[in-house]
Image (tube, grey):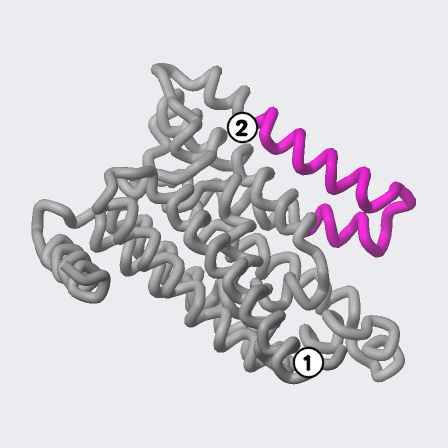
Amino acid sequence: MTPATEAETVMAEFWNVLTDGDFVFVRYAFIMGACASVAFGMVGSLVVARRVTYVAGAVSHAVLAGIGASVFAQRAYGWLWFDPLLGAALAACVAALLLGLARFAATEREDSVIGAIWSVGVAVGLLFFAAAPGYTDPMSYLFGNILLIGVRDLWLVLVLDVVIIALTVFFYPQLKAVCFDEDFARLRGVPVRLAYTLLLLLIALTVVLLISIVGMVLVVALMTLPAAAAGRFTRSLWQMMALASVLCLVFVTTGLVFSFQADLPTGPTIILVAGVGYALALGARSAVRLIASPGQ
C-alpha cells in the first residue's frame, strides 16, 4: 500500500468514526477544534506579535483554580450549574485583569506578578481538588481528555468562539497598534490600557476554548505554534491570522486522526503535530532564503 493510499484509508476510517453514533465524543472534539481554530489563529497571532507568550502561560495555569473551585462546588454544595469550563473562564478573566493591573498600575515587577499568578493558580486548583468529596484526577484537566466533552461544553465553546472573533474583528485597529508599537499608539490617541486589557481578556477566553482537548499545560503551544509558523510566510497581521487559523485546524484534525488510530492521548498528539509543523515551516523558510540568496 502506497503512503497516499494509506492516508486515504486512514481519513476514510476517521470519517466513519465521525459519523458513527458510538463515537459522539470524537465528533464533539472535532467540532470544538474546528470552531476554536479561528479564534486560536486570530488571538495567537496577537500573542506572537506582542510577544506575550509568558502572559498566556500564566493565564492558562491560573484556570486550574477556577476548574478546581467548580469541581469542589459541584460535589460539596451541589452547584451543578457551575460547569468547570465556566469556572475556568472566570479564573482566566480574573488572572487577565490582575496582569493588566500589574502592567499599568502596580509598582511590583510584572514578571513577579506573572510568576505568582502562574504558581498560585495551580496550587489553589490542586487544593480544591484535594478538598472536593470523592476522587478527582487532575491529569485530564492538565493535559486534556476528549471523553470529558459534552453538549454543554460544546455550546459554551461556540459562544466563547463567537465573542472572541467579534471582539477581535471590531477592535482590530486598536489591538494591532498595541501589538506593534505601544508608544506610537498612545501618541495617536489609542486607549492603550484598555486595548492591552482587552488583549489579555481575549487570551483568557481563548485559553478556555480547547482546554478539554489539549489541557491547560499544552494549550499555549497550540495558541502560539500555528501563529509562529504562519508568521514565517506572511507580511501583515491579518494574513498571519488567516493562515494561523488554517494551520491550527490542520494540526488539530491531524492530531485527532493520529491519536484515534494509534490509541494515543489526544492533547499531546495534537501538540506534537503542531511542533512538527512549526519545524517544517522553519525549514521551508530557511530553504526559500537560501534559494533566493545563494551567495549570502
Q: From the viewer's perspective, is 70 left or right of 189?
A: left
Foreground pick, 282 / 53: 282
Residue highlighted by disc 1: 294
Foreground: 43 or 193?
43
Instruction: Name the image quarter holding residue 10.
Output: bottom left
Quadrant for the C terminus in the image = bottom right
The quadrant of the image that shows the N terminus is bottom left
User: Of helix, strand and loop, which one carries label 1?
Assistant: loop
Q: Position of residue 246 (x, y in %)?
A: 42, 71
Magenta part of the protein: which range? Answer: 97-124
Q: Residue at x 47, y 55 (%)?
A: 276
Percent x, y of residue 184: 86, 79
Query: For numbered disc 2, what is the local secondary structure?
Result: helix
Q: What residue sits right under mark 2 in the picture?
A: 125
The residue sitting at 64% across, 62% down in the picture is 47
> Which one is in front in this view, the residue at disc 1 or the one at disc 2?
1
Q: In which quarter of the image is residue 230?
A: bottom right
Q: Count neighbours of disc 1 (C-alpha within 10 A) and say few if under 14, some if 14 to 19, many if 20 or more.
A: few
Q: What residue type is labelled 1?
A: Pro
* Residue pictured at 42% horizontal, 19% vertical: 132
Query: Could you tell me what secondary structure mostly forms the magenta stretch?
Result: helix
Would residue 95 appear left or right of 216 to someone viewing this image?
right
